[in-house]
Amino acid sequence: MRALWILSFNMKRFAPAVLSALCLTLALAAPGAQARSRSHHAPHPSATPAPARTQAPAVTDGLAEARLIQVYRLIAAARSREALAQAETLVRDHPNFQLAQLVYGDLLSAQMRPLRQAGDVPDTAAQAGEAQLKDLREEARLRLKALSERPPANTVPSQFVALSARHRHAIAVDTSRSRLYLFENGEQGMKLLADYYISVGKLGVEKGSEGDQRTPLGIYFITSNLDPRTLKDFYGAGALPINYPNPYDALRGKTGSGIWLHGTPPGQFSRPPQSTDGCVVMANPDLAHIIQTVEVRSTPVVIAPSLQWVSPQAARQQGQGFEAAFNAWRQAKSAGDLPRLLGYYTPDFNSYGKNLSDWTPQLQQEVAKAAGKGFVLKDLSVLHWTDTAETMVVTFGELVTGSSRGSTKRQYWVRQGQQWKIFFEGVIG
């Protein structure tokens, strides 16, 4: 490994410890590194597959980050003058990009003296800002990791079992990598459009209560688009709230609210990886692209501790066992068989405050309205979530056969032993 980075870092002014994370990352991205990594670090059979390591692919991300990555590449190629010129341009265009300023400062200092480490400032300044330097180094490590560890081609996060054309885009967040992935859902299936560096809660993830400074994990949907003119500068380019707590969160007694995807204040380009009160925070240019792209209410947002990338076919196969239960529920409803239909609902069912007894008259009315005609379901989407229990989030349009108008519904199913049961059902806007 030492030989690899010495070859890459043929820069007399950089001591061996300087940008060691960069050396390691670029070494892993070098030709043949993937095979070497596999031979020495074979994953445990039950481990979640990490995105594949590939040879220095283009970063499909915000322009500022792509430019920073190019500076790193020039440093690794011993092209320090070009790196300095590009870093200077980058900080001029984005003076609040602290990580870029750190790299630019190192490149300037390297012209005068050897550097001991990334962010090599005088000892007195280092002591005063050690926490900030640590955060910036971690941010650099995660951004560089996104360069060398890319999602395998033609794969999707395992949660996306099936998305109808109505869901034109989808978002998946890998909190362990501080990365948000934006997908386009078209005729050929889901396509990764871009990915972005993000920040999550100060105390990590798996939110459970109000004010715990954690980011929730689960399947959510963007509920609205808040006009930045109505928000404090703290939220930057705007905010996209999500429906935390969702019905599964509520079932488990989780509390809190106000979880948004939002930007940063004008004087701050990005935030440290763990620095929010629970929201997912992005650089303003990146958030602006998200806001311009996605649709409110129809865009799912998966927030996971680690994404498992699988083929679309493998994702669909995860829903095969559930599909039989869903079709049986559908047949019972179309047949007007209320006792059999009620058997698909859990005793603790809830629909916007209505328990199963309160919900039963609603089912009776819907069955009576069909009057033996049955129901047509369209735009079916299925999302899969597994933690302490296995759940399916199902969204579909439902209308009586022969009718031109219906309603859009969402169900949450939970697996109980070998059976699937509904614990939430309701009409959505």
Image (cartoon, rainbow, N blue to C red):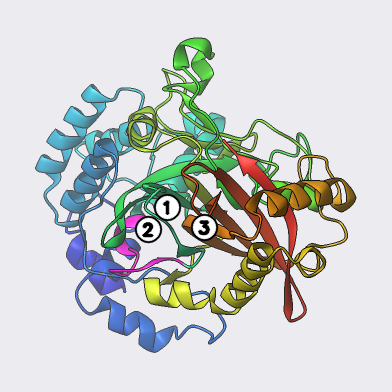
Specify which label sits upstream in the sequence, 3 or 1: 1
The residue sitting at the top extreme is 229
In this rendering, does residue 163 appear at all? Answer: yes
Distance in Å between CA atoms under marks 2 and 3: 46 Å
Across and down, in percent, residue 309 comes to: 42, 69
Q: Circle 2 sits on which residue?
A: 145
Across and down, in percent, residue 4 comes to: 24, 71
Residue at x 37% of width, y 36% of height = 290
Across and down, in percent, residue 374 comes to: 59, 60
Q: Amino acid at mark 2?
A: Lys
Q: Circle 1 sits on which residue?
A: 142
State yes or no: discs 3 and 1 in contact (Cβ < 8 Å).
no
For the N terminus, the quadrant is bottom left
Distance in Å between CA atoms under marks 1 and 2: 5 Å
Count of marks placed on residues: 3
Secondary structure type for disc 2: helix
Residue at x 20% of width, y 53% of height = 73
Across and down, in percent, residue 350 comes to: 80, 49
Residue 376, which numbered label? 3
Q: Give, as a single range, the part of the protein colored magenta.
A: 145-157
Q: Amino acid at mark 1?
A: Leu
Residue at x 15% of width, y 36% of height = 86
Residue at x 66% of width, y 41% of height = 244
In this rendering, does residue 386 appear at all? Answer: no
Specify which label sits upstream in the sequence, 2 or 3: 2
